[in-house]
Image (spheres, rainbow, N blue to C red):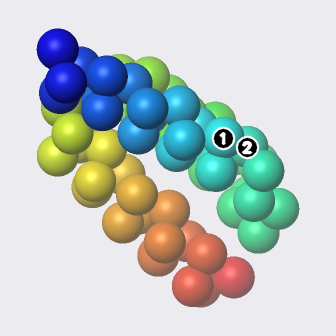
């Protein structure tokens, strides 16, 4: 139960992060949100967060 709530919180937070950071290109936002919606574990979310950080650092 705790892991499920943690997963949902992380997923919601990352979706908000992607939507609100202007440095992420529009096409990348769509891909990232799609990946976040299809993520099945916390490790998936961690990997997506790393991709977000790489995109931001390149901008």
Describe residue 48's horizontal placement relative to residue 33 as left or right: left
Image coordinates for residue 40, horizontal then vertical, percent? 21, 24
In the rendered image, which quarter contains the N terminus? top left
49 w.r.t. 10: above or below = below
Name the side, left or right, on which 31 lies relative to 37: right
Q: Residues within 10 Å of mark 1 (few under 14, many from 20)?
A: few
Q: Quadrant of residue 55?
A: bottom right
Classify 10 Å Cα crowding around label 2: few (below 14), some (14-19), many (20 and above): some
Compute the Cα span from label 1 to label 2: 5 Å
Q: Position of residue 49 (x, y in %)?
A: 40, 57
Viewer-nearest of discs 1 and 2: 1
Total numbered badges shown on the rendered structure: 2
Q: Is residue 6 left or right of residue 14?
A: left
Q: Is residue 39 visible?
A: no
Residue 9 point in image, percent of width and height: 43, 32
Looking at the rendered image, the quarter that the C terminus falls into is bottom right
**Label 2 sits on residue:** 19
Q: What residue did someone put label 1 on?
A: 16
Instruction: Tell me, yes or no, if residue 23 can be seen here.
Output: yes
Q: Nearer the viewer, residue 43 or 25?
A: 43
Residue visible at 30% across and 32% down in the picture: 6
Give the residue at x 82% y 62%. 22
Say whether marks 1 and 2 touch (CB < 8 Å).
yes
Question: In the displayed structure, would residue 12 be above or below residue 1?
Answer: below
Looking at the image, which residue sits at the far bottom? 58
Residue sticking out furthest to the top: 1
- Who's the residue at 59% across and 85% down the image? 58
């Amino acid at each position: 139960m705790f892991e499920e709530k943690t997963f949902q919180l992380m997923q919601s937070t990352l979706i908000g992060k992607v939507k609100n950071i202007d440095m992420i290109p529009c096409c990348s936002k769509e891909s990232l949100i799609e990946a976040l919606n299809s993520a099945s574990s916390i490790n998936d979310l961690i990997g997506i967060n790393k991709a977000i950080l790489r995109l931001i650092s390149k901008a």
